[in-house]
Image (cartoon, coloured by chain):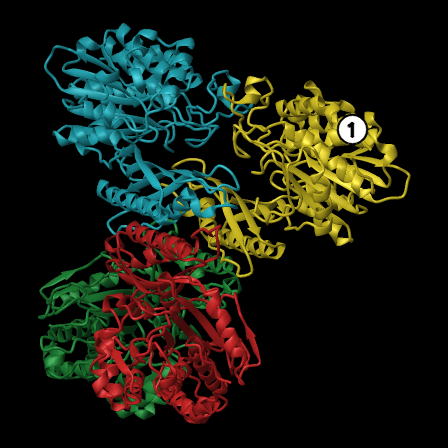
Chain colours: A yellow, B green, C cyan, D red
């Protein structure tokens, strides 16, 4: 079987898609234009396409944007090439898309997951940044694909093309999962709880870059820290600081006390833990006792248990600090991910497959270096919990700057590499193989 | 009427009494020897004498010593000249004494209040401290009459002598109140709540020294701050700081957080306020997560309302801090006093009387300089609440060192001055006068 | 002498001026349009007019806006009716104006001071707010005359009109001082240090409202707290909170520690003190160790000495907190005012004068209720330091909402009242009087 | 060669020594009686014995007791069986002892290290605690051998006996090192810096218990955390909290601020770290602004570098906190130990030897479970730095309660096990072996 050509055929499409998504960067739960284009394309290919509440449980979405933000962005998307038919099905930020092809032949359920969201970063708009030079820098202020998810979405579209082209060779069922809001670990949980991987036997999530050079692949990335993202909002009572300080209830004092307390949560003897208050804003004017303060917190743990410990302690600290100053506090979980680990059998299989790709020079089974947190772990844990196999693969590429940097860009050859390796994995999982 | 001589007759007694009490200094609620000697003497003079539960409401005593401390000191007192008959009636630290004389003739109820307790200070035992030199330094370690209450008790005995000597001249009822545990404002409340000044028309409390020179008198001392004395005891859970820090519940973190919070209670726009954490001890060893911490707090306010505000805020802060670190806290009120003010009419009367005393060169009606807190205010407020008049008088004397200093001593001529002025006030209040 | 009519003649002008200034509200050091209109009008009347560096010492200005802000606002002002000739002389935010008339006849130097700046408040734009209803709500977003300084400027123009009209009756010298940036107590110091009241014999500052009803006047407002306004900006080092927390230098921890420390500066036994951290912002994202934090602080004291104590303590706390977390901090004083008190002789004179005004029903010599801080005290102290007399007068009026509230408005009759009383004071000070 | 008997011969001596040391428990740098008995016995056996300044560099001792404590304990020791001749050489707490035997035959320098100090724990004095029941509970209040160092000293004496008995079989040099003050990691550094292991080729430190059962041995214990023990003493200025709070400089506020800051030192991404404030005491009385506060801190790190990071951060925090409140702070290092690791070759050799001991059923080469910190690492690192081999061996035994518990006791058979294994190791290291 010789289908290598197929990847070459879509090489230009991959780059076009990626640049289109890059130019129209949309942050988590606002990927309306992106998701509607994905849905529309998959439908055209012949996939059964499900979106919105069909693939996401709204209650399990974390950190959804405000209604106003959703409405404003919807208008922007419609004016900028979105497909209204699909958008109408993605109300309230439920921008997930799943394309399904059932071959009708007995076989495993195989799922590939990519993500689609950009970051709240202002892209560099100077001459030495290629996306700006070549005209595909983000048109949205303070939204930028600085982590490569534009590439991930393109890879998903490329992979869906090859799989449908070769549908007759396959058996079982293929699911292509386009997840919203991976940044801040906010979107995966709602797709898992909706049940979209309940029947999945093999699950592969993909990320490009992450310090791996072009031509190299890690087939079993590990070391994901469990995490919880928390917003705390303190509400007190304003008062004039000169004339009636005793009337005030100082929300900033509560918040500052919480900051000190949060950073002092004891280390856990069973593994790594982390806590950070990355943002705090409180008060309205120099001479007013602050009546409000908000903060952004995150906890992490080497295991889900350790993160749970951190989260529980954090909650006590925030609530106690609020009580100290007679203020109220609202604690919202706006993101979370468990820890997770890859299935060795699937990793091994993927390694064998990858070694045969002409795009790949080097394959590593394993990488334990912590790369932070990823909510793909929700999918992985769930698939493994019913006996399936799951892994997380990193496709190396050359970066112009680190992830989350305003000058981030990547060598687009990685798009072909990824599609080739993932396509080969599907064939292998149904006992075929490309020569 | 010429009764000036009377004071001269008891001059030596005043000094002997004072020095005996000074030598046998007893701190709050342990004034067993002192009180039993007072009771015994008053009885001999012919007073109706009430002690213990007859004059104190136990529930309203604050900061009572432990049973063990009471027992140990009782034994000391019995070996050192206490009168067992009376001590047996002063169980559980109820060491208050009231001597009453009812003349049988219609007239006002007049009350004089003195206090009897020493301080937890180690008296100076070197040659340049007169009490040591002349053999009447305290025999009790870390207990010392460093505020003059030994003198107050002597004044009370002297005054009781003169009044009984002249009983036939008097009308109405006289009450001599010997209060325990004024230091830390712990004892007055229990006597007031027992009702011993329910029927009092004129109330005069007395203090010597306080920066006023010998021969001078302030007949209406004001500026007492309301106060609450609080002990907070945090209880967490110990753990080895190296091997299992996550198991601990850090009582010292809670306490340290409370310290910062307490000192930051907002100022009150309606008047002076104060807060202090004067003592903190926490933890048991360098490598153990502290499972306990205790602190001594006091709040003050220019008015009772302001102090209530401080106390309420303090309580919230302590409780919230405990909750932050998942610890428990016990908050005990171990002392309190309201604010208070003198009755101008009684002040004026006392001024007129004092000006006639041969011991007095200068009389001031008023002094607003804050001298801290005093639980005589409980008596004063209660007397005034049913229409009586009350005042707080300061009898000046020369001090060898400031109040609460280990070298404190005073010129004993003040004892005669005080007795003379107070005796004159009794006569005046029943419309007599000494020439 | 009957010149009452004069005030009536300019009544409509007063209202027009006030509404024009209200509509074109400009905050401290940006009063370019306002000041240029004032300067232009005074010049037309015949005053010697000095502005910019002629009347302000730049080094003594506190909290000047950035160059960019100045430039942007200058453009706005020029498009909205400012007088370019005058604006060119008010570079860098030096928007103070002084109009001087020298009569050529021997006599005292009399100075009146009004202020011109608005607040950073978004004015209410709903139907029940008169300025909105009648079309003179502020056209500048987040800038609003919510304290009445629009009225003060109008009063200054009205007073200047009457004085010039009656120049021939007067003797000595009159100075009309239009001060910028009273809010935040930022502008007075620079005018005083420039020397504009070095020769002043009588100084009168004016404020409307402040809880005094229409028809009432306080001729000697006291109780101004000394104050210092401080900005603290902490700079640390960012780091990824998950992968390399040890590299970070946490500016937010430093700031939070400073917040707790600042609020715990001990009370001062000699008088009232205040401290507030009214605003804090720190950090850039949830998963980044915060590399920066800024806060707005103010201290106050019943006396300049007490405020100096607060300020000194605050500085130590901020610097120590920065050191704790190995961060740098820049502490800027962006405003200050000393305490101050009125001259009884001038107050008395003003009371006599005010009682004769047909606009005035009630006059109080004195008001000690603290109304916060005011940098008119710089002028007052300086005038008094060389033997002059100074006072601060409050002209009552009806308010629609409290000062600094988004619905603030006032009964414009106060404009006539103020002009009438101040004009009468000038006559009186040169020994004339209106019948 | 059959010398197994030898151990049996001294079995009773081992128990007697251990119980004698247990009964006369002496804490770090006060092991005068213990050390003098050790020195005296070694001398009798024929060792060259060095003590005091011959084996310890005074400047490198950490946390030495006060002169008064040393003097008082010296008197106690002399009255309780100490050898005055030796004590006179151990001035100022330099209680280390080294016994040296030079065989005169070429061969390696082999060193064995035991420690001698007890803990500041009050031993259980109730019937179910064997040392109490059998009459060898500590006679020193608040001093107890609760970690087994009494056993270690006995093992050292036993080993020295066997080695001297078999001196003719040996070659090279043997050093028996009796180290003071291991608790708090205070004593090793001074012996290392004095040079006593400069020439050592093989170094073996020994501990009993630590969770290993009787009959089991760990020949290469690892996982020691580097640590620094720090005392911080804040000095401020007292003031009456009611009458003059502004005069005070609050040492307790500084200390409480430091507590919060210390616990919030960021985790280190390269390995485990720890910090604890295990003790804090501040203030002298409820109504006094605290003028002093002292705290006991410890930092730990998986590597010496990580601990250095923790220590450096801790120092900044303590100093910054002191500066915040205008107080002074003295920071003393009162203990420290680096991290360390065992030499695999020596571990392997020891394992081979131990497997032949009739007392041993199970041998583990390695144990990475952190057992906290140990200053034996100073010796180990130094020996390894010049090419020698070092290890730390744990001899299992049954415990009645955990280490540092007031009911700690152990099965004394461990003494024979330890002596047998260590004796065998010496033979092996000179190429002999017991059958």
- Circle 1: element type: helix
Eyeballing the image, is A227 above or below B67?
above
For the question of whether residue C353 can be seen, the reply is no
Looking at the image, is B190 positioned above or below residue A260?
below
Q: What residue is shown at x 38% (from left), y 30% (from top)?
A: C213
A101 or B430, nearer to the observer:
A101
Q: Residue at x 21, y 75 (%)?
A: D67
- Name the residue at 56% across, 50% down: A300
Q: Is residue A94 above or below residue C73?
A: below
Query: Where, quadrant-wise, is the C terminus of chain C in this rendering?
Result: top left
Q: Is residue A76 left or right of residue A400?
A: right
Looking at the picture, how far across and down is residue D244, in whole percent?
24, 56
Chain of the residue on which disc 1 is drawn:
A
Task: Residue A245 in the image: state x and y as whole percent.
Answer: 39, 45
Image coordinates of residue B259 in percent, x first then y, are 38, 58
- Quarter of the figure with residue C405: top left
């Amino acid at each position: 079987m010789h289908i290598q050509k197929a990847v070459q055929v879509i090489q230009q499409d991959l780059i076009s898609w990626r640049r289109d998504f890059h130019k129209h960067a949309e942050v988590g739960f606002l990927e309306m234009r992106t998701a509607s284009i994905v849905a529309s394309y998959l439908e055209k290919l012949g996939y059964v396409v499900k979106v919105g509440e069909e693939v996401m449980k709204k209650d399990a979405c974390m950190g959804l944007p405000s209604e106003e933000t959703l409405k404003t962005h919807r208008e922007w998307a419609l004016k900028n090439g979105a497909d209204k038919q699909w958008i109408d099905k993605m109300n309230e930020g439920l921008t997930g898309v799943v394309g399904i092809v059932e071959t009708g032949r007995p076989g495993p359920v195989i799922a590939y997951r990519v993500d689609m969201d950009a970051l709240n970063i202002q892209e560099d708009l100077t001459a030495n940044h290629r996306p700006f030079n070549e005209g595909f820098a983000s048109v949205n202020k303070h939204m930028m694909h600085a982590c490569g998810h534009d590439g991930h979405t393109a890879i998903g579209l490329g992979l869906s093309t090859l799989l449908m082209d070769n549908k007759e060779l396959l058996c079982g069922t293929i699911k292509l999962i386009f997840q919203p809001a991976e940044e801040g670990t906010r979107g995966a949980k709602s797709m898992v709880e909706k049940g979209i991987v309940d029947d999945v036997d093999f699950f592969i999530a993909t990320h490009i870059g992450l310090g791996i050079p072009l031509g190299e692949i890690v087939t079993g990335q590990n070391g994901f820290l469990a995490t919880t993202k928390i917003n705390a909002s303190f509400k007190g009572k304003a008062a004039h600081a000169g004339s009636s300080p005793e009337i005030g209830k100082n929300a900033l004092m509560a918040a500052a006390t919480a900051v000190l307390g949060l950073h002092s949560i004891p280390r856990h003897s069973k593994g790594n833990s982390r806590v950070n208050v990355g943002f705090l804003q409180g008060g309205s004017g120099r001479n007013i006792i602050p009546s409000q303060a908000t903060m952004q917190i995150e906890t992490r743990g080497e295991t889900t248990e350790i993160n749970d410990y951190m989260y529980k302690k954090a909650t006590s600290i925030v609530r106690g600090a609020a009580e100290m100053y007679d203020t109220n506090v609202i604690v919202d979980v706006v993101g979370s991910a468990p820890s997770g680990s890859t299935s060795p059998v699937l990793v091994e299989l993927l390694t064998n497959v990858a070694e045969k790709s002409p795009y790949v020079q080097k394959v590593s089974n394993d990488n334990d270096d912590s790369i932070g947190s990823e909510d793909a772990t929700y999918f992985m844990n769930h698939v493994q919990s019913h006996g399936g196999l799951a892994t997380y693969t990193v496709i190396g590429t050359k970066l112009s700057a680190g992830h989350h940097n305003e000058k981030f860009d990547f060598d687009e050859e990685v798009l072909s590499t990824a599609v080739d390796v993932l396509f080969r994995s599907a064939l292998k999982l149904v006992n075929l193989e490309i020569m």
